Image (spheres, rainbow, N blue to C red):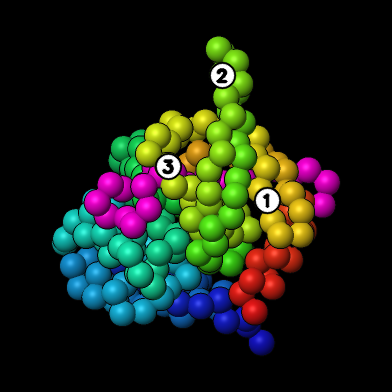
Amino acid sequence: MTENKGRVLLTGMSPETVDRFQPDLVEAGFEVVLEPDAGRATEHLNEQGFRAIVSYYPLETGHLGAILDSMRAKDSPNYGTGLVLLVRRDRLRAAAGLVGRGVNKALSVEEGPVVLRIVLERLIEVAKPMVLRLPLAIEVSAISGRNRFEWTTDNLSGSGMLIGTEDPPEVGTAFRFILFLPEGEVEGDAVVVRQTFEGREAVGGFGARFLAFQRDGQARLLQFLREAEA
């Protein structure tokens, strides 16, 4: 029996594109919700949560900003949900510039359906971020030396964290972190993947993706998240 991998929203794409990608996703266990009109897709995003969202870019109708507004709004059921853009190969470079700014992945529409399925499966491997405010120490290496910051997480998952600050590092900045869990410290390395959208998100700051953990840090973090969700 195929595992139920949850709902995925496909929007902004032609019937031909849907016909190419939908069957493989359904076969893999995704429940596919279709909404060709990106404007109406925001109604779905406001009403129900999805494991991932796939949008054609540029959109046939509507604007990507409206989708991002719905996803990143305070109390949105899709806050933290992954967004993948399907684009023509000649537009891939432009779409890739949106990665880290609300978009998780830009993928050429010429790629096979299996590639999209794999991308979505990787996006949902880790549980949706939970609102967890935990103390955090960060050390950023630069040419001028090492700078240490003490911040607080605003949400946390097994793959990354959202950190509130008025002075976020640049996207692409790698850093060493110490996360202070109740059971002890978790140390590792992470990279800044996006800055939050001013006025669109409740938290001002940046999102970071974990790169590596020291010793058993990842296992302890995942255990902590499972217990926090219970």
Q: Is residue 57 magenta?
A: no
Residue occupied by mark 1: 180
Instruction: Using the numbered discs, state the Cα–Cα distance from disc 2 to disc 1 in whole angstroms.
Output: 24 Å
Residue underneath mark 2: 142
- Do the CB atoms of the residues marked 3 and 2 lie less than 8 Å apart? no
| Label 1 Cα crowd, 10 Å radius (few <14 / some 14-19 / many 20+) | some
Which of the two marks, 2 or 1, is nearer to us in this view? 1
Spot occupied by residue 188 in the image (x, y as percentages of width and height): 70, 41
Q: Measuring 59% from the left and 55% from the top, which residue is drawn there?
A: 134
Give the residue drawn at x 66%, y 87%: 1
Residue 143: image location, x then y, percent: 56, 13
Using the numbered discs, state the Cα–Cα distance from disc 3 to disc 2 in whole angstroms.
Answer: 19 Å
Q: Locate residue 220, reporting x and y percent.
A: 76, 59
Q: Is 226 left, or right, of 86 in this rendering?
A: right
Name the kind of residue labelled 2 in the image: Ala
Extreme residue toward the right, this view: 215
- Say which label, 3 or 2, has the lower sequence index: 2
The quadrant where residue 42 appears:
bottom left
Mark 1 vs mark 3, CA separation in Å: 18 Å
Q: Is residue 168 left or right of residue 132?
A: left
Q: Quadrant of residue 168?
A: top left
Q: Residues within 10 Å of mark 2 (few under 14, many from 20)?
A: few
Which part of the image, by quadrant, shows the C terminus?
bottom right
Q: Earlier in the sequence, mark 2 or mark 1?
A: 2
Amino acid type at mark 1 = Phe
At x 33%, y 64%, the residue is 74
Q: Element under label 1?
A: strand
Which is nearer the N-term, disc 1 or disc 3?
3
The magenta segment: 195-216
Q: Secondary structure at mark 2?
A: strand
Q: Which residue is mark 3?
A: 165
Front-lying residue, 83 or 56: 83
